[in-house]
Amino acid sequence: MAYVINGGERPTSRFQLFVDLCSQAYNLIRKHSGLILNLLSLMTLSGLPELTGNQDLKYVYDALQPQTTDAEATIFFTRLIESSLGSVATKFNFFIHNLAQLRFSGLPSNDEPILSFSPKTYTLKQEGRIRDASIFSFQKRYNPDKHYTYVVRLLREGQSEAQFLFRTFDEFQELHNKLCILFPLWKLPGYTQTHTN
Protein backbone atom coordinates (compact mmCIF):
# COMPACT_ATOMS: atom_id res chain seq x y z
CA MET A 1 0.00 0.00 0.00
CA ALA A 2 2.65 2.51 1.02
CA TYR A 3 4.80 1.52 -1.96
CA VAL A 4 2.02 2.38 -4.42
CA ILE A 5 1.02 5.61 -2.66
CA ASN A 6 4.62 6.82 -2.42
CA GLY A 7 5.47 5.71 -5.94
CA GLY A 8 8.45 3.82 -4.55
CA GLU A 9 10.12 2.75 -1.33
CA ARG A 10 10.89 6.17 0.13
CA PRO A 11 8.22 7.93 2.19
CA THR A 12 6.70 10.98 0.53
CA SER A 13 4.21 13.68 1.44
CA ARG A 14 1.62 11.73 -0.56
CA PHE A 15 1.51 9.05 2.11
CA GLN A 16 0.93 11.60 4.86
CA LEU A 17 -1.85 13.13 2.75
CA PHE A 18 -3.34 9.64 2.36
CA VAL A 19 -3.29 9.11 6.14
CA ASP A 20 -4.83 12.55 6.73
CA LEU A 21 -7.63 11.94 4.22
CA CYS A 22 -8.34 8.48 5.66
CA SER A 23 -8.49 9.95 9.17
CA GLN A 24 -10.88 12.67 8.02
CA ALA A 25 -13.10 10.06 6.35
CA TYR A 26 -12.98 7.91 9.49
CA ASN A 27 -14.08 10.86 11.64
CA LEU A 28 -16.90 11.69 9.20
CA ILE A 29 -18.16 8.11 9.42
CA ARG A 30 -17.87 8.25 13.21
CA LYS A 31 -20.14 11.31 13.32
CA HIS A 32 -22.91 9.07 11.95
CA SER A 33 -22.06 6.00 14.03
CA GLY A 34 -25.52 5.97 15.66
CA LEU A 35 -27.25 5.82 12.29
CA ILE A 36 -24.81 3.20 10.99
CA LEU A 37 -25.28 0.99 14.05
CA ASN A 38 -29.10 1.31 13.84
CA LEU A 39 -29.09 0.33 10.17
CA LEU A 40 -26.81 -2.62 10.86
CA SER A 41 -29.01 -3.75 13.77
CA LEU A 42 -31.99 -3.81 11.39
CA MET A 43 -29.95 -5.97 9.04
CA THR A 44 -29.17 -8.64 11.66
CA LEU A 45 -32.36 -10.46 10.67
CA SER A 46 -31.52 -10.41 6.95
CA GLY A 47 -29.54 -13.64 7.05
CA LEU A 48 -26.11 -12.22 6.26
CA PRO A 49 -23.52 -14.60 7.76
CA GLU A 50 -21.24 -11.67 8.68
CA LEU A 51 -24.00 -9.88 10.61
CA THR A 52 -25.91 -12.24 12.86
CA GLY A 53 -26.07 -10.72 16.32
CA ASN A 54 -24.92 -8.35 19.00
CA GLN A 55 -21.29 -9.51 18.86
CA ASP A 56 -21.08 -8.25 15.25
CA LEU A 57 -22.63 -4.90 16.22
CA LYS A 58 -20.19 -4.62 19.14
CA TYR A 59 -17.30 -5.18 16.73
CA VAL A 60 -18.49 -2.26 14.56
CA TYR A 61 -19.12 -0.12 17.68
CA ASP A 62 -15.58 -0.79 18.93
CA ALA A 63 -14.12 0.01 15.51
CA LEU A 64 -16.03 3.31 15.22
CA GLN A 65 -15.16 4.40 18.77
CA PRO A 66 -18.07 6.85 19.09
CA GLN A 67 -17.12 7.67 22.70
CA THR A 68 -13.72 9.20 21.79
CA THR A 69 -12.86 12.67 20.52
CA ASP A 70 -11.86 13.26 16.90
CA ALA A 71 -8.24 13.77 17.96
CA GLU A 72 -8.17 10.48 19.89
CA ALA A 73 -9.85 8.66 17.00
CA THR A 74 -7.32 10.10 14.54
CA ILE A 75 -4.45 8.82 16.69
CA PHE A 76 -6.14 5.40 16.96
CA PHE A 77 -6.72 5.19 13.20
CA THR A 78 -3.19 6.37 12.34
CA ARG A 79 -1.75 3.67 14.61
CA LEU A 80 -3.91 1.08 12.84
CA ILE A 81 -2.47 2.17 9.49
CA GLU A 82 1.10 2.11 10.85
CA SER A 83 0.67 -1.36 12.37
CA SER A 84 -0.85 -2.68 9.15
CA LEU A 85 2.20 -1.58 7.14
CA GLY A 86 4.42 -4.08 8.93
CA SER A 87 1.84 -6.85 9.01
CA VAL A 88 2.53 -9.96 6.94
CA ALA A 89 -1.23 -10.41 6.49
CA THR A 90 -1.54 -6.92 5.00
CA LYS A 91 1.38 -7.48 2.63
CA PHE A 92 -0.10 -10.81 1.52
CA ASN A 93 -3.54 -9.23 1.11
CA PHE A 94 -2.04 -6.44 -1.02
CA PHE A 95 -0.23 -9.03 -3.17
CA ILE A 96 -3.48 -10.98 -3.71
CA HIS A 97 -5.33 -7.77 -4.59
CA ASN A 98 -2.67 -6.95 -7.19
CA LEU A 99 -2.96 -10.41 -8.71
CA ALA A 100 -6.74 -10.16 -8.79
CA GLN A 101 -6.58 -6.72 -10.34
CA LEU A 102 -4.29 -8.01 -13.08
CA ARG A 103 -6.39 -11.13 -13.64
CA PHE A 104 -9.89 -9.69 -13.58
CA SER A 105 -9.48 -6.10 -14.64
CA GLY A 106 -6.15 -6.72 -16.33
CA LEU A 107 -4.85 -4.02 -18.54
CA PRO A 108 -7.25 -1.35 -19.72
CA SER A 109 -9.75 -2.34 -22.38
CA ASN A 110 -8.78 -2.11 -26.04
CA ASP A 111 -10.29 1.36 -26.41
CA GLU A 112 -8.52 2.71 -23.31
CA PRO A 113 -4.78 3.52 -23.44
CA ILE A 114 -2.45 1.96 -20.89
CA LEU A 115 -0.42 5.17 -20.72
CA SER A 116 -1.94 8.63 -21.17
CA PHE A 117 0.76 9.67 -23.65
CA SER A 118 0.48 6.55 -25.84
CA PRO A 119 -2.85 6.25 -27.68
CA LYS A 120 -2.45 2.57 -28.57
CA THR A 121 -0.74 -0.60 -27.42
CA TYR A 122 2.21 -1.80 -29.46
CA THR A 123 3.31 -5.42 -29.74
CA LEU A 124 6.65 -7.10 -30.27
CA LYS A 125 5.36 -8.56 -33.53
CA GLN A 126 4.32 -5.14 -34.88
CA GLU A 127 7.30 -3.07 -33.80
CA GLY A 128 10.17 -5.48 -33.18
CA ARG A 129 12.31 -6.05 -30.09
CA ILE A 130 14.08 -3.01 -28.65
CA ARG A 131 17.81 -3.70 -28.63
CA ASP A 132 18.88 -0.42 -27.01
CA ALA A 133 17.18 2.66 -25.58
CA SER A 134 19.10 5.69 -24.37
CA ILE A 135 18.62 9.40 -23.76
CA PHE A 136 20.08 10.99 -26.89
CA SER A 137 19.55 14.64 -25.90
CA PHE A 138 17.10 16.99 -24.24
CA GLN A 139 15.34 20.18 -25.23
CA LYS A 140 14.06 23.07 -23.15
CA ARG A 141 10.48 23.93 -24.13
CA TYR A 142 7.70 26.23 -23.00
CA ASN A 143 4.07 25.12 -23.04
CA PRO A 144 3.26 27.61 -21.39
CA ASP A 145 5.63 26.80 -18.51
CA LYS A 146 9.23 25.77 -18.96
CA HIS A 147 9.82 22.02 -19.12
CA TYR A 148 12.34 19.62 -20.60
CA THR A 149 11.63 17.09 -23.31
CA TYR A 150 14.01 14.15 -23.51
CA VAL A 151 14.90 12.64 -26.88
CA VAL A 152 15.03 8.85 -26.54
CA ARG A 153 17.03 6.96 -29.18
CA LEU A 154 15.66 3.46 -29.89
CA LEU A 155 17.48 0.73 -31.78
CA ARG A 156 15.40 -2.30 -32.75
CA GLU A 157 16.49 -5.75 -33.90
CA GLY A 158 16.34 -6.08 -37.68
CA GLN A 159 16.27 -2.31 -38.27
CA SER A 160 19.35 -0.35 -39.28
CA GLU A 161 18.08 3.15 -38.52
CA ALA A 162 17.37 4.49 -35.05
CA GLN A 163 13.97 5.80 -34.03
CA PHE A 164 13.60 8.87 -31.83
CA LEU A 165 10.86 9.44 -29.25
CA PHE A 166 10.19 12.68 -27.39
CA ARG A 167 9.11 12.24 -23.77
CA THR A 168 8.72 14.55 -20.78
CA PHE A 169 9.78 13.77 -17.23
CA ASP A 170 6.11 13.39 -16.26
CA GLU A 171 5.68 10.75 -18.95
CA PHE A 172 8.71 8.83 -17.65
CA GLN A 173 7.24 9.12 -14.14
CA GLU A 174 3.87 7.79 -15.35
CA LEU A 175 5.59 4.80 -16.98
CA HIS A 176 7.59 4.14 -13.81
CA ASN A 177 4.46 4.32 -11.63
CA LYS A 178 2.52 2.00 -13.95
CA LEU A 179 5.36 -0.56 -13.85
CA CYS A 180 5.45 -0.36 -10.03
CA ILE A 181 1.70 -1.02 -9.87
CA LEU A 182 1.70 -3.84 -12.42
CA PHE A 183 4.82 -5.52 -11.01
CA PRO A 184 4.93 -4.74 -7.25
CA LEU A 185 7.53 -7.42 -6.49
CA TRP A 186 10.11 -5.85 -8.81
CA LYS A 187 12.60 -3.55 -7.13
CA LEU A 188 12.60 -0.74 -9.66
CA PRO A 189 14.96 2.10 -8.82
CA GLY A 190 13.18 5.26 -7.80
CA TYR A 191 14.04 8.66 -9.15
CA THR A 192 12.92 12.22 -8.74
CA GLN A 193 13.09 15.27 -10.92
CA THR A 194 16.11 16.53 -8.96
CA HIS A 195 18.13 13.49 -10.11
CA THR A 196 17.57 14.44 -13.74
CA ASN A 197 19.05 17.93 -13.58
Image (cartoon, helix red, strand yellow):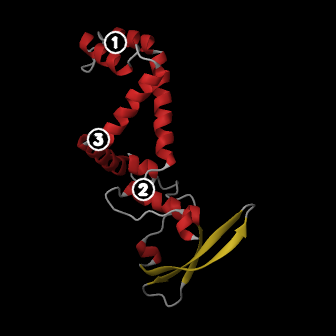
Query: Can you give x and y, in whole percent of width and height, for residue 173 in the image?
Result: 52, 61
Residue 197 placement, left or right of 19: right
Mark yes or no: residue 185 visible. Answer: yes
Q: Earlier in the sequence, mark 1 or mark 3?
A: 1
- How far apart, in angstroms, are the residues tagged by discs 1 and 3? 29 Å
- How far apart, in angstroms, are the residues tagged by discs 3 and 2? 17 Å
Mark yes or no: residue 118 visible. Answer: no
Q: Earlier in the sequence, mark 1 or mark 2?
A: 2
Query: Does 75 appear above or below 187?
Result: above
Foreground tag (1 vs 3) = 3
How packed mark 2 is, by other alpha carbons closer than 10 Å (few <14, some 14-19, many 20 or more), is: many
The residue identified by callout 3 is 90
Task: Depth check: give the residue in front, 29 or 164.
Answer: 29
Q: Are marks 3 and 2 in contact (CB under 8 Å)?
A: no
The residue identified by callout 1 is 43
Query: Can you give x and y, in whole percent of width and height, for residue 82 in the image?
Result: 35, 38
Q: Amino acid at mark 1?
A: Met
Q: Amino acid at mark 3?
A: Thr
Q: Quadrant of the N terminus?
A: top left
Task: Depth check: give the residue in front, 99 or 19.
Answer: 19
At x 42%, y 56%, the residue is 8
Residue 15 placement, left or right of 52: right
For residue 115, the mark is none
Q: Secondary structure at mark 3?
A: helix
Q: Quadrant of the C terminus?
A: bottom right
Image quarter of residue 145:
bottom right
Q: Amino acid at mark 2?
A: Gly
Q: Are marks 1 and 2 in contact (CB under 8 Å)?
A: no
The residue identified by callout 2 is 8
At x 27%, y 16%, the residue is 56
Image quarter of residue 7:
bottom left
Foreground tag (1 vs 2) = 2
